[in-house]
Image (spheres, grey):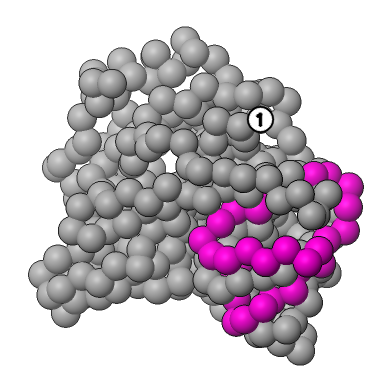
């Protein structure tokens, strides 16, 4: 998706749990028509968790018949986008010719690399009858030596992703490894992403396999080392410790993180790069129409003047 920056979220430190480094309460922004976005990353005190450099929680929103989401074609470089839905559907189109309807529980990974453009819209059938939407979009920064790889696209239906179930727990492994299972998605760096649904009083482990880790609370409330935390919040942990999360009530959360990147990134609009001059070049490419066209699209989002 294409979002202009919001101001920094509110944050706080939870002192009673030494392993918990930062708590981010996302700032809510209405993008129009009641379409709410909560942004947890990037943040002034924490740009990334592993390679996750952008994390938006959008919805819940209810569209009446004839209305829907319309994110016109816009460009990306130096990152991969992950779109994950809990409710609703999105029709993805990109300049590589990929057209894919995204449904709840599916993994949709678009790697921009040296450059790609895409649009995201409510499918015609859903628009005609009215629909609801709730989901997440994340950006994964690419390693500096892989920022200019060819653009690519991967999609995995919910039924093809590994699911681990135990008493009071259901986890869908979207990327990487967790709970003894591994997703099939191909990645250019080491990261993981898991949807975890836990019934009340269920304890869920967050192991120390990955260097950087966070939990995003989508719905519900958890307890960690005696401290209660309620959705929506991002909990960022220090490396090295095994963590136990206890669901106080029925809770939906995302486990995420990975190996720390080799350095910070420059971010401007939809562009991410380790080099400022590369972002300047991408601006000119978009203004000059040098990104490929998106099939079946005539509109586009102009380069912002910011």
- 228 horizontally vs 95: left or right: right
Magenta span contains residue 233: yes
Q: Residue furthest bottom?
A: 167
Q: Residue drawn at (14%, 66%), measured in percent from left and top?
A: 67
User: Main structural element of the magenta stretch: helix, strand or loop?
Assistant: strand
Q: Judge by depth and name the residue closer to the eye, 125 or 43.
A: 43
Left/right placement of residue 208 relative to residue 128 reads right
Q: Give the magenta part as a residue range.
A: 225-254
Q: Please state, as top left, top right, bottom left or bottom right, where the C terminus lies in the image.
A: top left
Image point (67%, 66%), residue name: 228
* x, y percent for residue 39: 45, 47
Can you name the residue that lies furthest to the left here?
66
Asked whether 140 falls inside the magenta stretch, the response is no
Q: Eyeballing the image, is 131 above or below 90?
A: below
Residue shown at the point (89%, 47%) measured from the top left: 240
Q: Is residue 32 visible?
A: yes
Q: Residues within 10 Å of mark 1 (few under 14, many from 20)?
A: some
State which quadrant residue 159 falls in.
Answer: bottom right
How many marks on residues?
Answer: 1
Q: Is residue 202 left or right of residue 51?
A: right
At 24% from the left and 67% from the top, the residue drawn is: 123
Q: Is residue 175 visible?
A: no
Give residue 299's position: percent from left, percent from top: 15, 41
Question: In the figure, 116 relative to 231: above or below?
Answer: above
Residue 148 place in picture, x, y as percent: 55, 25
Residue 185: x percent and y percent?
64, 57
Q: Nearer the viewer, residue 239 or 104?
A: 239
Can you identify the residue that label 1 sits on? 143
Locate residue 259: give its quadrant. Answer: top right
Dividing the picture into quadrants, the one containing residue 222 is: bottom right
Q: Nearer the viewer, residue 86 or 231?
A: 231
Secondary element at tag 1: loop
């Amino acid at each position: 998706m294409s979002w202009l920056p919001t101001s920094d979220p509110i944050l706080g430190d939870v002192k009673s749990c030494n392993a918990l480094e930062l708590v981010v309460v996302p700032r809510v922004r209405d993008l129009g028509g009641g379409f709410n976005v909560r942004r947890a990353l990037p943040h002034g005190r924490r740009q990334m968790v592993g390679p996750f450099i952008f994390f938006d929680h959008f919805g819940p929103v209810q569209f009446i018949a004839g209305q829907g989401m319309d994110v016109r074609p816009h460009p990306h470089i130096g990152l991969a986008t992950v779109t994950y839905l809990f409710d609703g559907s999105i029709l993805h189109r990109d300049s590589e010719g990929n057209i894919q309807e995204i449904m709840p529980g599916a993994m949709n990974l678009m790697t921009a690399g040296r450059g790609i453009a895409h649009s995201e819209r409510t499918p015609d059938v859903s628009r005609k009858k009215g629909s609801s939407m709730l989901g997440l979009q994340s950006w994964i920064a690419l390693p500096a030596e892989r920022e200019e790889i060819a653009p690519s696209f991967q999609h995995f239906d919910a039924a093809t992703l590994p699911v681990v179930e135990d008493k009071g727990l259901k986890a869908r492994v979207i990327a990487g490894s967790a709970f003894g299972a591994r997703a099939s998605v191909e990645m250019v760096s080491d990261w993981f992403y898991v949807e975890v649904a836990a019934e009340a009083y269920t304890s869920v482990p967050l192991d120390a396999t990955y260097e950087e880790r966070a939990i995003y609370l989508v719905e519900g409330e958890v307890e960690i080392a005696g401290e209660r935390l309620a959705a929506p919040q991002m909990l960022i942990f220090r490396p090295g410790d095994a963590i136990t999360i206890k669901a106080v009530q029925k809770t939906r959360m995302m486990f995420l993180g990975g190996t720390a990147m080799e350095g910070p990134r420059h971010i401007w609009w939809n562009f991410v790069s380790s080099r400022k001059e590369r972002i300047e070049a991408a601006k000119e490419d978009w203004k000059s129409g040098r990104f490929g066209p998106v099939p079946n699209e005539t509109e586009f989002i102009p380069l912002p003047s910011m």
